Amino acid sequence: MELARKLAILADAAKYDASCASSGTTKRTSRDSAGLGSTTGSGICHSYTPDGRCVSLLKILLTNYCIYDCLYCINRVSSDVPRARFTAEEVVQLTLDFYRRNYIEGLFLSSGIIRNPDYTMEQVIAVARTLRIDHQFRGYIHLKTIPEASPALIEEAGRWADRISINIELPTEIALKELAPEKDLVRTEAAMTGIKERIEQSKAERRDNPKGRSFAPAGQSTQMIVGATDASDRVILARASSLYEQQKLRRVYYSAFSPIPDASSKLPLVAPPLVREHRLYQADWLVRFYGFKAQELTRDAKPDLDLAIDPKLSWALRNRHQFPVDLNKAPRGLLLRVPGLGTKSTERILKVRRWHKLRVEDLPRLRVSVKKVLPFVIVADHNAANLSIDRDDLEGRFRPGITQLDLFAGKSSVITGQL
Ligand code: SF4
């Protein structure tokens, strides 16, 4: 099979994997020695498609042939799709060619399971090892690893890769048994724990020997499929939160389930709305950087995130007793809970208020949206309590208008006012 045809099949097969963002890597530089590529500053540059996926890496599968039968996956053994397989040398050559043409800044490599997990990992590792050793490749490498592979192979993968990841796929053991019978949540988490410990050990070794080789310096990540089962956002966020806490993951990626041809009747016929994926990312952000607990963002009675408004605003509207927040006095943790205040604007407020009592006119200068924050805050010349934060129509002011499908284009149009 021609290389171009293989590339078309195996790049397309890789598009379902969302875990490709490359932020957070340590600086690799070509200045100190001969070598290709460099991930400067805070990490390599990357760009995103409109649905948020990273496209600056060559993102391919080594093969879409697979002996497993995960029902949600188009590459499962029982799927009738064209198959292709790269050799390790072909992936190395493609990576170098694309890199030299400035198409990419690195490689994201995953694979279906060929023969068995160890054989597959050996093939994947061969690509990374050849790039690093034979070609002095200094670009970013993300390797998808297989939890059933032997620890020695995962150890070697981490030696060559900036980031390694294992997909957890589904948030509960029951769902995994139902849809991916060869996979096992306990085994996956055990493999993640091994990687976490190896990363911590590597960090300690680097403190004594800064020039030593790091193990997966950009950490480990995982991906969960959303909407393939009836798992609620509450369950998904609880699992993500425990992975951040216990496995110290750098990222959990959420990938909206895409219906596939000839799918099992156990799967839904339609994809979940993409906005659900977006709301999960927002909630994830609140947990990682805003001090929220995952369970605060949903309720038992309503376990899914509100699709119409963002999770912080939704939380604030349910917890109005915690407002208004005084921007001139409140501690950082409380400021971060105000809808419309991000981490950067919070830092600006903390800095400026040391010298100056904040007024409404100061907010635009601090790049704060007056419209968003005013219903929730007190400043020197404004008190949201006087405007009655409890008013019934407050929530309605933030909800988007009714959406109706266009007659011909099938696109949605938003009705914001009276007809
Ligand atoms: S292991 Fe499962 S998810 Fe991965 S390629 Fe094979 S069938 Fe797809």
Image (cartoon, helix red, strand yellow):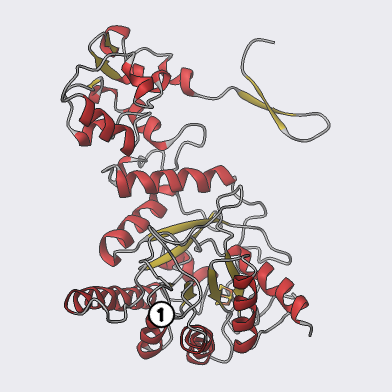
Image quadrant holding the N terminus, namely: bottom right
Work out whether 211 lies above or below 26.
below
Work out whether 93 lies above or below 266.
below
Measuring from the top left, give residue 79's x and y in whole percent. 70, 75
- Asked whether, in this view, residue 330 is left or right of residue 115, the answer is left
Measuring from the top left, give residue 57's x and y in whole percent. 56, 66
Taking the spot 37% from the left edge, 34% from the top edge, the residue there is: 312
**Which quarter of the picture shows residue 244?**
bottom left
In the rendered picture of this protein, how many numbered marks are placed on residues? 1
261, 88: nearer the viewer: 88
Measuring from the top left, give residue 50's x and y in whole percent. 61, 47
- Asked whether, in this view, residue 412 is left or right of residue 372, the answer is right
Ligand 1: does it lie within 8 Å of the C-beta at label 1? no
Residue where numbered disc 1 is placed: 33
Asked if residue 314 shows in the view, the reply is yes
- Asked whether, in this view, residue 67 is left or right of residue 171, the answer is right
Asked if residue 82 shows in the view, the reply is no
Work out whether 327 lies above or below 27.
above
Image quadrant holding the C terminus, namely: top right
Taking the spot 81% from the left edge, 29% from the top edge, the residue there is: 407
Q: Secondary structure at mark 1?
A: loop
**Which quarter of the picture shows residue 105?**
bottom right
Q: Quadrant of ligand 1?
A: bottom right
Measuring from the top left, give residue 317's x and y in whole percent. 36, 26
